[in-house]
Amino acid sequence: MAGGFAAQPTFLPIYFEMKDRGIERLKKSMMYSYGFSFFLYLSVAYFGYFTFPQSVQPNLLSSDYGKNKAMLAAMILLSLYVISDVPLFAHAFRKSLAELLLSAARSRSLGALKVPAEVRRSYVEMDREAVGPESKKTEIDNATNNNRANVETAKNEDAKVEMAAVVHEREKEHALHGQLSLEQNPTAPKEKVAESQPPTSTALQSARTPKSFFANMSFQLPERQHIIVTLSFVLSAAGVALVADNIGQVNALMGSTTLPICFVLFILYLYLHICVYTTLLSQMVPSGGSSQAASFFLLRSFGGPTHYHCLNDGSPQSWVCFLASAPFYNYTRKSQAGPDRSRKT
């Protein structure tokens, strides 16, 4: 029963662990998980209602079942489930917190790359802790170019000499980095080291697909913050368990706050927005669109926005065409109407 009870909040974290995510797998996952949990809810509810109509007490922790082997097995299985379920909640909580904390850094990074504002929202910055040495080389290149410009615009000779020294140090660091990269991988061609780019820049220049978007989507906190957030989450849950004398009161509090928000209001929110976006996208796209638009918003709600790259001449080729949010529509049309129609944004 506890496993079915937690099926709704754990569905999305499990879905994000899949390697090949797509709308079809999303539908199947929702159908099987929610169908199984509904069947489990219904069976256990009727069984409990007709078997123990007045003999159930809310504080399960103080229940003494004696030497009942069936209840002992159920308690052991419940303990194993709770232990294995904590990481799912902790990962989802930490990821949501990381997205909130790193959203400003993402905007600054994409702004430095001079990416249009409409496009910035559809990309995710790789965390600096996960950025490889190639990214650091590109950062040095950018800093060197800026410093050379500063040398040319310096007001006096002293400033020019100072800026030229900075450029020299940057170029030495750049050359040292290229040499170390080749020593670590002697078989790698020199062009690869010279032309390597950071993950964010590569993502901005590559053709966007659902798979590549999810593969590049990564918000990772630094190691110290990662540990602090995880410990805080686990210790807060343990604190509630130690302080609460009656677990029935905790369940009542969750049943009146968290559960209605996650299981009722959130689903209602998705339903209303799916209807709105279905109508909107059906008007934007001449043919088809209802089922694709609904699928689009479900995937966007669960996985984040991406570009659609197959809206050619206003005719959708597949549901991939709809993997973008409505604000991107005008920007995409402007890009297609520009002088370079072959360039992908």
Image (cartoon, rainbow, N blue to C red):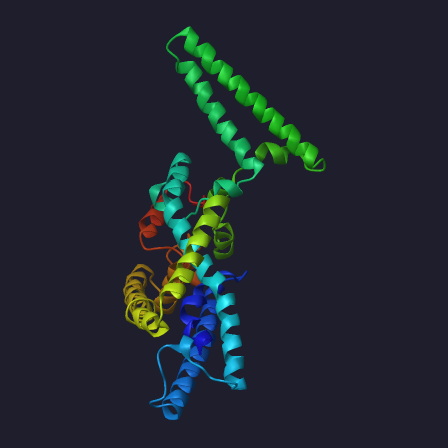
- Which residue is painted at 53% across and 62% down in the image? 18
In front here: 129 or 174?
A: 129
The quarter holding residue 111 reads: top left
**Left or right of 328: which side holds 130?**
right
- Which residue is painted at 42% across and 18% down in the image? 150
Q: Is residue 122 above or below residue 181?
A: below
The quarter holding residue 108 reads: top left
Please provide percent x and percent y for residue 41: 40, 81
Q: How many marks?
A: 0
Please provide percent x and percent y for residue 53: 34, 90
- Which residue is painted at 44% across and 67% down in the image? 10
Please provide percent x and percent y for residue 264: 30, 71
Of the 4 image quadrants, the one containing the N terminus is bottom left
Of the 4 image quadrants, the one containing the C terminus is top left
**Left or right of 265: which side holds 236?**
right
Residue, far right = 187
In front here: 101 or 72?
A: 72
Asked whether the viewer can see residue 49, the reply is: yes
Please provide percent x and percent y for residue 120: 38, 44
Residue, far bottom = 50
Q: Is residue 215 above or below residue 150?
A: below
Asked whether the viewer can see residue 220, the reply is: no
Q: Is residue 113 above or below residue 70?
A: above
- Which residue is painted at 42% across and 75% down in the image? 61
